[in-house]
Image (tube, rainbow, N blue to C red):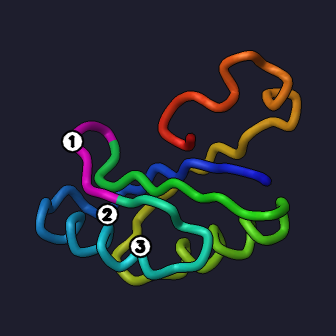
Amino acid sequence: MIRAVMLIKSGGRVPKAVSLGDELKHIACVTEAYAVFGRYDVVAFFQGDDVKQVFEAVSRVTKLSGIMNTETLIEGQGNKDADEYDRGPFS
């Protein structure tokens, strides 16, 4: 299992960010997505069986209308050995 987080800029309009978050929830591998306040407008969480599956979902998201910029953080495999691995927003 591979997990990732995507930070998305959509132009700073709250209704647009909320709508985009709702749209993202319908994409395979997206486990959560919602509007946020700060440097980014939307955050999306991904989970897939392997890197290829997560990469395909991330690629689909980047092609959606209204996305200006993204930053994606993919989990490092070495993290699975940590005692706290099963805690946090993905557990």
**Answer yes or no: do the residues labelled 2 and 3 have beta carbons within 8 Å?**
no
Q: Is residue 47 above or below residue 27?
A: above
**Mark pair 3, 1: CA separation:** 19 Å
Where disc 1 sits, the SS reads: loop
Query: What residue lies at 30% left-to-right and 73% top-to-bottom?
Result: 22
For disc 2, the marked residue is 10
In the image, is 55 to the left or to the right of 52?
A: left
In the image, is 23 to the left or to the right of 4?
A: left
Q: Nearer the viewer, residue 91 or 32?
A: 91
Residue 51 x/y as whole percent: 83, 60
- Residue flagged by tag 2: what amino acid is it? Ser
Q: Which numbered mark, 3 or 1, is in the foreground of this view?
A: 3
Query: What residue lies at 87% left-to-right and 28% top-to-bottom?
Result: 78
Q: Quadrant of residue 39?
A: top left
- Residue flagged by tag 3: what amino acid is it? Lys
Residue 59 x/y as whole percent: 65, 74
Q: Which numbered mark, 2 or 1, is in the foreground of this view?
A: 1
For disc 3, the marked residue is 25
Query: What residue lies at 59% left-to-right and 58% top-to-bottom?
Result: 46
Looking at the rendering, the stretch of residues picked out in magenta corresponds to 34-39
For disc 1, the marked residue is 37
In the image, is 10 to the left or to the right of 3?
A: left
- What is the crowding at mark 1: few (fewer than 14 residues within 10 Å), some, or many (at least 20)? few
